Amino acid sequence: MLMMFLTLPWFGDLLAEPETKAVYAHYMGCWPAGSGALEWERQNGLKHLRHDRGKGVARHGGHVRNYDLVPPDKRLSLEESADIEIRRAMRIGIDGFAIDAWAGQDDAKRTLNALFAVAEAKDYPFKITICLDPSCGGGGEAIKYLLDRHGKSPKLARRNGKPLIFGYGTGFFYWGYLKQRFPDKSEDEIKRLRGTPEAWKYLGEMHREWEKIAGEPCFFHIDMGYFFHEVPNGVMPPDPVVKAASIFGKQVGAIGAFTWAGYGGLGPRLPDIAKATINAGAEWSCPIGMYQKENIPYELFGPKGTEWVDYCWSDARKQNATLLQITTWNDYGENTNIAPGWNTRFGSYSLTGYHIQWWKTGEPPALASDRIYITHRKYPRGAKVWPFTQGGFIDGAIEVLTILPRPATIRLPGRDAEYEAPAGYHRQQFPVTPGKVIAELLRDGNLELRLESPERITDRPFREDNGMVCWSSEDERLWKEDFGDTPMLIYSEYGDVDNDGLPNWFEMYWFGQWGDMKTATVAQPDDDPDKDGKTNLEEYHAQTNPTLGKPKMEIELNKEDRKAGKDEKDIEDEFED
């Protein structure tokens, strides 16, 4: 597999890159691909998905949509998982992983240790470190854990000879440090203190204390997002984030942020923050990633298509960023992952590799063959969600992104859309309307490439789902590099693999096993299992329960609740909620 990696068309350029540019991917150690908690959830938890059981996220249809893309019936050992994760990352030019310390606690530590073991055993040109996370207990002790076990490893990430330590939510660490340093100050006084330049020197002191705990000097990367969270108005100087960067840049090695968009993003101030950081002597780490965020049922934001991929990497090139942390490699729960997934396939992943090469070389990669990426949402605005809770919505688009060595004609059969795509990198978007999503590439009237998304756009969604669906000309090739002749998992909820008019989700959810595509063909459209006079196909079109009628099913499925002292009225009220 390493030989495949060495023969990829752009790998030679990556070998020649100057050492000053490096890109790491933020890694959730609790969710290694094909192993651990995520694999258990796919094999055991999905079968219990019900619209009429539980509260909160369960009523939205669960939390995760875009699971890890691995053979569905194969469980990987932790070492096998580490191996494929590293190989996938190297293939697109990522230099290392920064494991969130410690999301998943002991599980994250086991993943960290497995990544080091595999990288060392196979001598992969790949580095590993941690990203300190205030919500998970990271800090000086997390660094000490890393260095005690792996401080002498040749695969430990270093910068300027020092262990490289990334940061997330550094402002919250700083907030806690000020409370510890000034125990007599009130919460309001600490909030005001955080916004004053005279207190910003304490950020450096905090990091020096962490170095004492860890036992050696470190190269710290800090996250400026959320830094002035809850600081009262009128306390801070003008342009506080820019001013702070000019001071913090003298105390740490690199300054960045987790996202430029959404809550906590630094937005239009990024160019000035970058300039202040570099002028202060630190490296600029432009926010990269968060091409979308779908943290059901809490946060939801994203563009119509893949625009944020371009914006992130364009900023990195323009702002002279030299050290990057992509967010994230594998946070499947928030759908920010660039690692291959059920819905995005190799789309976000492959596009990220294209932009990494562009960032490292300074030139857009010259490709010898055509590439097409189809991206779309699963349903348009106004579609009624049933049987799960309605939830939020993002306006989306059907997007066709092409990277072509020569101009070509692109057409979307069934959508009355055709246009001329230029050579190079080009994006075209169309309205989200129900039906198949197909893109064809023609030259001189000859069909040269055809892509059909496995996922169709529906007007009858069964649950909230605003993440991107991707299908690209790269998917099958990359799957084969990962898993050889093992059939590719082509997951689809609104597709219809047996072409009987009943979408895959309908057959899996009501008659098969949820999430198992092998059960997407188990129902017959003309059957009437609940004997209510409506066929399965009619029930689907009417968005009604095909199995036991309504509302009898919901009541019978809540017998456990009745044993707990609830009567049928309680159960019906709970279902309506």
Image (cartoon, rainbow, N blue to C red):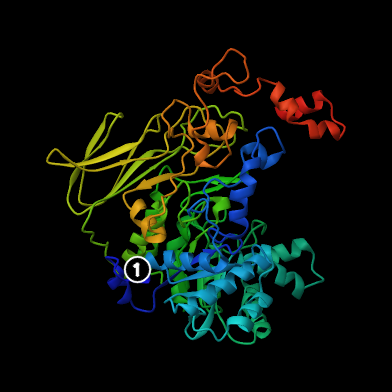
Q: Provide residue 462's location: percent of width, then percent of height.
A: 56, 32
Image quadrant of residue 142? bottom right
**Residue visible at 42% across and 50% down?**
345
- How crowded pointer 1 is (Cα within 10 Å; few <14, some 14-19, many 20+) is rated as some
Vertical placement of residue 100 versus 502, above or below: below
Element under disc 1: helix
**x 33%, y 55%: residue:** 477
Q: Quadrant of the N terminus?
A: bottom left
**Residue 364: x %, y % from top left:** 27, 61
Please say whether residue 221 is visible from this viewpoint. Answer: no
Residue 520 visible (yes or no): yes
Task: Using residue 395 as the reference point, say whether residue 437 is left or right of it.
Answer: left
Residue corresponding to mark 1: 5
Residue at 78% across, 28% down: 571
Residue at the extreme right: 565
Q: Nearer the viewer, residue 344 or 267?
A: 344
Q: Nearer the viewer, residue 282 or 47?
A: 47
Q: Is residue 177 left or right of residue 436?
A: right
From the viewer's side, name the closer residue of 486 and 154.
Answer: 486
Vertical position of residue 239 compared to residue 52: above or below = below
Q: Quadrant of residue 568?
A: top right
Quarter of the image that includes the C terminus: top right
Name which quarter of the figure residue 528 lies in.
Answer: top right
Residue at the spot 61% in from the left edge and 71% down from the top edge: 197
Kind of residue indicated by mark 1:
Phe
Percent position of residue 69, x then y: 48, 53
**How far from the left and from the top, in percent, is residue 274?**
44, 67
The single residue placed furthest to the top in the displayed view is: 533
Farthest left residue in view: 444
Q: How many marks?
A: 1
Of 176 and 505, nearer the camera is 505
